[in-house]
Amino acid sequence: MRTPKKYSDLIKKKEITNKIIAECIYSVNKRAKNYRDKMEDYKQAGFYKYKENNIENAKEQKEKYYSMKEDLLLNFSPKLIHKQYVGEKSQRVYSYQKNYAKLYNEKINDIIWENSYYDYDRNKEVEFFDYSLGEKKYLYFLYYEIGEYSFHTPITEERVEKNTQLEIKEIDENFQTHGADIVDLLSTQFVQKVIDLLDSGDYTIIE
């Protein structure tokens, strides 16, 4: 969307509001999710000439926008940690691995998924299976509230154990986030100006 003149004027005066920062985070967060979804679409599509290039390009864009989001979130503290159950922990075994047949027979009752794909590097079909490890699997997210917006950023279980001062709250296993039409988002050029201003340390937060 077109950057509101009020926002541009404030940045020129080295002044900024939490609302502007929140809208910047919202913009790059939704753009990252758009590219995340594109990656999945490309992966699900049948083989075509530029498939791998498209996946890699989408991945780079996704990571770029998530990196911008992280830069902006450095200016805030998380309120708590969200914990989401995502199923059972599992291990994947490929047919090119040693003792594949032996492992398959040993884990036959614990197998939760099996399939195959064509490996162009090996020039052959590769079979694989996933077997349950008998443990629950969780994802963890730092949860932020900034103005009218809320944001998540993933963290490892190891980092959760170090953030003992934060409350851990379990969220619905069906919770998911989506992208957004970029015409409704602040431009990446404006977001970068905000990041540069915050990185400089030469600014004033106003209401």
Image (spheres, rainbow, N blue to C red):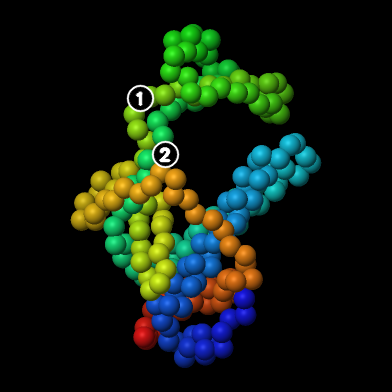
Q: Residue at x 41, y 44 (%)?
A: 173
Q: Is residue 158 visible?
A: yes
Cα distance between the residues tagged 1 and 2? 13 Å
Q: Position of residue 98 (x, y in %)?
A: 52, 14
Q: Residue at x 48, y 23 (%)?
A: 112
Above-or-below relation of 191 to 38: below
Q: Earlier in the sequence, mark 1 or mark 2?
A: 2
Which residue in the protein does label 1 denote?
134
Which residue in the protein does label 2 denote?
86
Kind of residue indicated by mark 2: Val
Above-or-below relation of 180 to 109: below
Q: Position of residue 61 (x, y in %)?
A: 60, 57
Assign the C terminus to one quadrant of the image: bottom left
Q: Residues within 10 Å of mark 2 (few under 14, many from 20)?
A: few
Q: Position of residue 76 (x, y in %)?
A: 34, 68
Q: Residue at x 40, y 30 (%)?
A: 89
The image quadrant of residue 131 is: top left
Q: Secondary structure at mark 1?
A: strand
In this view, the residue in front, 113 or 16, is 113
Q: Residue at x 65, y 41 (%)?
A: 43
Q: Which mark is residue 61?
A: none
The image quadrant of residue 84 is: top left
- Decide if residue 79 is on the left or right side of residue 100: left
- Decide if residue 84 is on the left or right side of residue 162: right
Q: Position of residue 39 (x, y in %)?
A: 62, 47
Kind of residue indicated by mark 1: Gly
Above-or-below relation of 47 to 36: above
